[in-house]
Image (tube, rainbow, N blue to C red):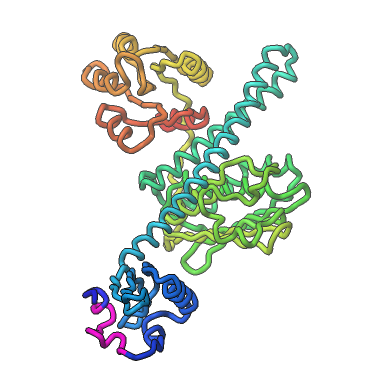
Amino acid sequence: MSPDWMTMTKLYGKGIIADTEEPDMKWQGKYIPPSNWLFFNSMINDCIREKKALHLEHRVLRSNGSTGWADTKVVPLLDAKGRIKEWIGASIDITARKQIEEALQKSEAALRGKDREKNKYISMLSHEFRNPLAVIAATISLLQMSDNKDETAKLTDTLKRQSDQLCKLVDNLLDLTHINEDLLLLKKDDILLNDLAVNTASDLRKKFDVKGIHFIMDIDNKPLLLHADPVRITQIIGNLLHNAIKFTPKDGTVLLSLKQEEDEAVLRIKDNGMGIRRDLLPTLFTPFTQADNSLDRQNNDGLGLGLSIVKRIVTMHGGTVAAESEGLHKGSLFTIRLPLIIRDDAPADNSTAEPAPKTFNILVIEDNKDLAEIFCSFLNKLGHKVWGAHEGRSGVKIAREIRPDIIFCDIGLPGMNGYEVASTIKADVSLKKTLLVSFSGYTDEASLQRARESGFARHIAKPVRMDVLRQFLDECI
């Protein structure tokens, strides 16, 4: 008898199965689970009939009351007339192996599921990027053919709208990557959520008007003070309002309310639009989840990242976000709760008269000539004096000649890269007052840390949005 079997059953010797003149199969009820009796008997009868060995992996009742697995091998011993005289065999406990195999099977199934999801996301990603790119390419062709000012203006608006969509897609992907890798840094300050909500909604009011949606605001007059990142709070409010615009039809209604409930600011965005299927609510804040995954995606012009980013940013602020809907075509309600700073008085208004516009001497070092030209033209239109260079060494040479106030420098430059340019500039005492700003698609923490160590004081991510650039220059005044 195998020691493994004895350990498994806590029985020894022939105490396992008592010798009898006739087989009574009582051992089966003691060691084999009832659900396996039929199968086990069939295998045994087959071996008896054909006088062949039995080799079987089967479930077995263990001494501790649990169900395990055994590997049983039994061989018949025949007499001189070829009749079965007795059986000899052994069983070993293979429960641990079976548990490992089961875990591996589950892991493989999960990996196959992840792989299918990955392929679906890549397909979706390709689709979402190709759409605006196709429109941009076609619009450029029409611009080249058009000499009508009204048509040109309309085509220009189309280019801006589609390029904004591309920027939004890239920004969402970068945000999700930074959040997943714990690289998203919040720049918190004491802010009035009332003002932030009103300003964000006001910026989008034109979109509500264009689509014919009734937009109502119900904002508490009592100052609601948060310690939060104003850019990220604006982002999550804007995201939910964009969704409300997208999924609410003409003549629909969207309500933005902001109230204090105990020690929390509670922001609600309610609409009477297309609603959300109830089965989607539990996974609505999961990345790449969209309310409509069909081919008819007239309202889904994104990657399904917005709500997952909203949830994670809210969580990083110590708050919660929830979604409610009675089902399709029954509207939806999103509720954000954020912890308040409870003070007797609102923060003092330290604002002063707006300073007069200031112009800077700016050097742009960028190897993409098209981007450099557009960048320089925009800065010129803002009233600044601008120089350009397309590689690092010539950029350093121009910097030493003009001693600019600000240098915007790409990282991936030919010859001398952006880090080397920054190190060289910082080592030059004649340029110690020059503000170095990197602008690049490299936004991971390691790249940003290397940029800081090289001498860059600020960073602007590509693709560079002109409103972000304008705001940055205003802050430099």
Asked whether 427 or 298 is in front, the reply is: 298
Q: Where residue 315 appears, x then y in whole percent?
A: 44, 56
Q: Which residue is at 66% across, 57% downward?
A: 276
The image quarter containing residue 27 is bottom left
Name, please, the residue furthest toward the front: 81
* Membership of 210 in magenta stretch: no
The image quarter containing residue 400 is top left
Q: Where residue 265 appears, x then y in whole percent?
A: 51, 61
Q: Where residue 395 appears, x then y in whole percent?
A: 34, 13
Q: Where residue 301 appears, x then y in whole percent?
A: 63, 40
241 to the left or right of 412: right
Q: Which residue is at 44% across, 50% downward?
A: 111
* Membership of 10 in magenta stretch: yes
181 to the left or right of 253: left
Asked whether 427 or 262 is in front, the reply is: 427
Q: Give the range drawn in magenta.
A: 6-19
Is any part of residue 163 visible from this angle?
A: yes
